[in-house]
Image: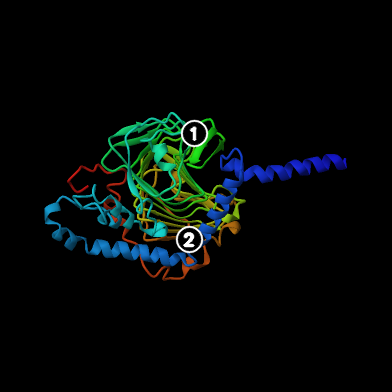
Amino acid sequence: MESTKFNLLFFYVIFLAILPTLKANIGHMDHVWHRRMKEAREAAKKAYKPNPMKVTAEFNTQVMRALKGSNSTRRDLKSNSKCTPANPIDQCWRCDQNWDKNRKKLADCVMGFAHGTTGGKDGKIYVVNDNSDNDLLDPKPGTLRYAVTRPEPLWITFSKSMNIKLKGELMLTANKTIDARGANVHIKDGAQITIQYVNNIIIHGLHIHDIKPVKGGLIRDSVTHYGVRATSDGDGISVFGSTHVWLDHLSMTNCSDGLIDVVSASTAVTISNCHFVKHNDVLLFGATDSFSGDKVMQVTLAFNHFGKGLVQRMPRCRWGFFHIVNNDYTHWLMYAVGGSQQPTIISQGNRFVAPEDRNAKEVTKRTEINSNGWKNWNWRSEGDLFVNGAFFVESGKKVAQPPKTDVKAQSAKSVASLTKDAGPIKCVLNKAC
């Protein structure tokens, strides 16, 4: 009997030890991955903002200031009279007719918790001219996999429009920008993009769709290391234990798992100007109720359009702090914003258009059945616009004590304009985007 108990305990301890590896899709957690994990945890601590409400106020101030001055800005851009950027992120770069020569200006435009993310700004421009992905261990020069596994900072662009079917997870190294402006680039019908235990990533302008779980195996994750990966989840983009990540102007739909997962103590993340359609589990911020390490997670979700065919999780949050601001929710079937494990959710200046189903009018969903379990969670709705019977159930002691915040968000009545260019933008050489 004692022997049986010992064996069960032994296997339970082994299971707990390999559980993070399984969730990370790492087939073997060697010393390289252990080192990366430790470095990532330290980076998350440094990136964490002890006063996140200050970040939300700074974001709102920037938006109000930029939009207030937009009329004078446009008068000064007489040669670019057709350039009418929808929001401050776009105002930062879109009216430059020489955007192709000044691509790295984009790195100055990130707002919210990912502010300061520079991607490959300090490196050379690398041009992808080959859409193949035939060798996961020795990627061919000119391919996207070759570019993202280089050790140095790189600003990665595309020579032409292309479809890329990834044969295995695309593992990014730190200090990379993937910039699809000027080309129509689709990541489709294959494996996901994985940002794991790295820092300083920008992904801009991609179409990502029809991503599937792909059988694992040996995959190169840097020039100096490769390892065994388990079957991938089928997310569009997985952000795992990473910091300073900016995902901007993406179009995403119809992936096997989530469109974007931000998990495992990732923080300093901004998701902006994206267009999401036709999907069930859209955005997951925090993977499990048991991993309290996600308390460091801080995410800005701004200027996105949640469109046709979406069901739930826009986002679904655990543990951390989430600023959901100036997004347009025109469709959902179950709910829009949900969570568990006492996340803080600050919803400001969003438009929520409820479905016709009278049982799905509530914007929010908490997995705790008993309200005593969530009544102290700090979920605020400030200046949101509710259409067709939509309503937001607030909670938290501070909600009922005005003023809720010092700086209000841009009015939800402006959301249609702020998000009108969500998704990849068609940029033409020698013209403002």
Q: Which of 409 and 70 is in front in this view?
A: 70
Q: How far apart are marks 1 and 2 (CA)?
A: 32 Å
Extreme residue in the right direction: 1
- Residue 307 x, y percent position in the rendering: 36, 42
- Nearer to us: label 1 or label 2: 1
The answer to whether mark 1 and mark 2 are in CB contact below 8 A is no
> How many marks can you see?
2
Task: Judge from the rendering whether residue 304 lies leftward or rightward of residue 239; answer left or right.
Answer: left
**Secondary structure under badge 2?**
helix
Q: Name the residue under label 1.
A: 137
Residue 404 visible in this rendered orientation of the protein: yes
Question: Which of the 4 image quadrants contains residue 70?
Answer: bottom left
Q: What residue type is labelled 1?
A: Leu
Extreme residue in the left direction: 78
Q: In this view, does 137 lie above or below 96?
A: above
**Secondary structure under badge 1?**
loop
| Earlier residue among tags 1 and 2 | 2
Task: Judge from the rendering whether residue 183 lies leftward or rightward of residue 296; answer left or right.
Answer: left
Q: Nearer the viewer, residue 313 or 201?
A: 201
- Residue 419 x, y percent position in the rendering: 30, 50
Task: Judge from the rendering whether residue 183 lies leftward or rightward of residue 29; answer left or right.
Answer: left
Q: Which of 384 and 153 is in front in this view?
A: 153
Q: Mark 2 points at which residue?
A: 47
- Residue 196 x, y percent position in the rendering: 50, 46
Q: Which of 199 and 85 is in front in this view?
A: 199
Neighbours of disc 2 within 10 Å: few (<14), some (14-19), many (20+): many
